[in-house]
Every structure is written in structure tokens, then in C-alpha cells.
Image (cartoon, rainbow, N blue to C red):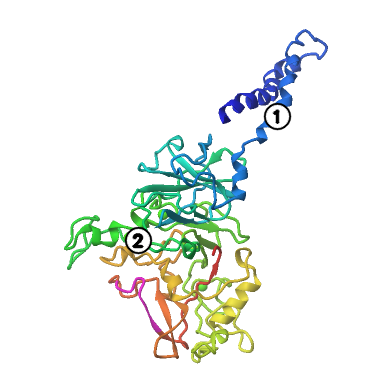
Amino acid sequence: MQRLFLPLFCVIALTGCGASEGGGDNGGDVETPTTPTTPTEPTTPTEPTTPTEPTTPTEPTTPTEPTTPTTPTEPSSPVDYTVDAALQAPVSLVAVAANQQIVMRWNDAPNAAVYTVYYSTEEITADTSLADLLIAFDNVEGTTYVSPEAYLTNGTPYYVTVVAKTSAESTKVSSFSPIKKVVPQDNGINVADLAQMRELNDTGTRYAVSSDTHLDACEGGDRGAKGQDCAFGRDVDTIASDDVDGVGGFSFSKISSDGSVLTADSEDWSCVLDHVSGLMWEVKEAGDSARGSTLSSGLHDADDAFTWYEPSLSGSGVTDGIQSNVNTPDTCFGYNDTDGFCNTSEFVARVNLTNLCGHSDWRLPSANEFISIINYGNNFARRSTFAVDTNFFPITDDTLVDSYWTASPFYDNSSRAWRVYLRDVRSSGQDLGKINGLSKGTSVGVMLVRTAHE
Ligand SMILES: [Ca+2]
Ligand SMILES: [Ca+2]
Ligand SMILES: [Ca+2]
């Protein structure tokens, strides 16, 4: 049906093309009406009304209850979509099986307006043709898909993937999101409970280990490869593990100071968006081993350090913290000795006043949030001195700060809070990504975060 319309549409489009092709004719005098034959075609232009027919786009109005729940093998007829490699695909996808049902959630892809969910009972790979797949749902708004009840067969493996579209009418789609395999089963899972789930970042670990050393590939070791971190997760997903958007399974975008999404090779960026977690991170300016109100290059100077002071958290079982470092109070841009101090909450307030990357809801990250961007893949054998992808978070050897505050209170000692090491201070690798408790009156780094996508 779709194919039938295409020739008609082309004919219409070609009248415009014909004009341009005949441009040479137009270049001459207009008074040679010798070829009035073509103008007879205008009969077709009446048909343009039909192109709006693509009936499928109307489906989104009835989400979760599509057409033929009883015959999962023939839902909506295949749509004539073609892949446009320039479109950003969703870079994370998680799918969970339930009784004759699945729930899927993916990340928001930049510039995407709607998504189409594909599935097959045959294995899907990055090279599989769209024509070989079935559409579970076309033009999904939002980033969650729940199949209708009793839609799938328990015990049957289903492969699922999602593509992005810039509009419901577009026939261009992105390449595949990561591909997941699910087997519906009566496992007591209520799909509604999982509609807000997210895929987790992986660890960056791509080498196997034995009890006394590391190996140079993800094989061997004292334990079966199935039991090793390097053998599962986003870091080994053939679609997600490209290094360009972040080492292994990490998938970051650089964000400009005004909030626009930049390419990975951009050299001027202010924030980083983590597509998997949905968190956006402040990016520090390069360290120059100088800090203080007169030495710092600006608000985001990588060398600046702050005490932990969070009055807004008091009352939840933690103390406020220390407003100003007793011994060395001038450790940041914006310090003065009357009403401008170098502590976490004042730094948050100063950054929010500037609308960094178009937002004013920046805050101190929790310990779990901070750990989500740690690359643990290099924390042995001195493979690296930094526990984060420095293509996106440009820590250098000149940066004075080794560790960063989190908002998480330390257990059993309210004078401390958790901090995370992004740099190895002992050159043995053992500090990379380490977290421990630190006295709130100590001055260390702060890297702010905000929730970009729930
Ligand atoms: Ca892993
Ligand atoms: Ca990656
Ligand atoms: Ca500095």
C-alpha cells in the first residue's frame, strides 16, 4: 500500500524536479511555447492529498492496546522505513520479560520526536534489515514501551530494538539501539513497576583477572569468563561499546554553555550529558595548579576546592558541615572574607545563578551518581592515572584536586561525608574510583550534577 503511493508522490515531486531539469529551457526566451505538451500532466497534482494517509501514525493514540494481541506474529504491517545513519539512535535499552509481556525503556535520543519498536523471534544484529523485522509499535511518544497483555508467548525468545525518528511522518529512522533478548515467562513481574527503570552504566572493565594478576583480554583467569565483569554489560555490547562516545559502554555527549548538544570532537564544551543515566555533569576548566580568589581562572576552575556545607540537608540525620576552611579559606573563585566562602552549597548557588548549560538546578551528586561515571577498567597495572574518561572530563596532571565531594553522609560519623577519587595519588592504581569518608572541614573538589532525564 505504501509502495503504491510512492510512485504517485514521486510524480508530483518530479514536476518540481522537471522544472529544475528544464532550467536550461527557461534560460532562453519565454516566448517559445513550442513544448506545451508537458503542462498536461497537472492532473496528478490533485493526488497530493493522499500522502497524508500513512495510517499507522494514528496508532499512537491507543498505546498499550494495539490491534491484534492474539496474533503477535502479524501486528502492524511493515512500514517502508529507511535507515539514516546521521540520526542519533537511542544508546541504551533495557527490556524485562513478564507473563506474555515485556516492558522496554530507552534513553532519550537527541533530536528524536518519536520511536519505533521492532522485534523478531529470529536473532537481530546491527546488520539486520528493517524489512525482516516486525513493528511492535510505531511512533511511540516517550521512552517506555509496554506490550499489551497476553501479546507474547511464554518461553519464546524475542529480540527487541528501538529506532528514533525526528517526526511521526518521517520515513527515515536511526540505526538500532542496543539489541536485547527477552523470554516472556510467568515470573510475577508487574510491568507497571518497571516503567521508569534505566539501564545501568558498566564499569569500563574489559580485561579478565586471575587471583594474582590481570590478563590482556577478556578470557582465561581463575574463574569462568561468564563470571567476570568483562564478559557482560554495556562494555561488551557490540552497539553500545564504541569508544567515540565514551570508553566502552559509556555514552556521553558534550554540551555547550548554552545547552546545545555538540559532537564528541568539539573542543569547547561546558557540560557532559550521560545518555545512560540521564545525568548532566559540570565540566571543569583545565587545572593550572593555581587556586584562590585572585588566581583562579573562573567559576569552574579545576583546582578550586571547597568544604562540605549543606544546610539544606540538616534535619535528615546529618549536620550542616563546615562553612569555611579554618586554615585555608581562600581556595576558590568568588571568595571574600565576608559573605563569599568556598563551600559546597555556596558553589552550587553561584553556578545556578549563571544558568550553566541552560539550567539552574545543579546540585552536589550522591555517591551512587558519582560512581556511575567511574571507569574502573584502568584501576590496575597503572594503565591510567584517572578514573574517568578524560576525553569528556579533562582532568590533567596539572589539576590540584584528586578527590571530589558527594552529597552522601558518611555512616556512623556525622562530621564526615563520602568523597570519590578520580585521580590515583599513589601511582599504584588503587585509589582510582575509591570512595571513603572525609572530614567536612577539608577542602576538596566539587563537580556538580543535575537530572536531565528522569
Ligand atoms: Ca561489565
Ligand atoms: Ca561508548
Ligand atoms: Ca586554577
Residue 357 rendering spot, x and y as whole percentages: 60, 63
Residue at mark 2: 204
Residue range (magenta): 430-437
Asked if residue 256 is among those painted magenta in the image, a careful observer would answer no
Residue at mark 1: 48
The quadrant of the rendering that contains the C terminus is bottom right
Q: Quadrant of residue 132?
A: top left
Q: Are marks 1 and 2 in contact (CB under 8 Å)?
A: no
Looking at the image, is mark 1 or mark 2 earlier in the sequence? 1
Q: Of the residues shown, which amino acid type is indicated by label 2?
A: Gly
Which residue occupies 43% across, 54% down? 101
In space, the residues marked 1 and 2 are separated at their CA atoms by: 52 Å
Name the dominant secondary structure of the magenta segment.
loop
Q: Which mark is residue 253?
A: none
Image vertical order of residue 331 relative to residue 184, above or below: below
Q: Relative to the observer, which residue lies in front, 336 or 359?
A: 359
Image vertical order of residue 214 relative to residue 316, above or below: above
Under circle 1, the secondary element is helix
Residue 416 rendering spot, x and y as whole percentages: 43, 87
Q: Quadrant of ligand 1?
A: bottom left
406 sits left or right of 114 in the view: left
Image vertical order of residue 125 relative to residue 246, above or below: above
Residue 448 rendering spot, x and y as whole percentages: 53, 72
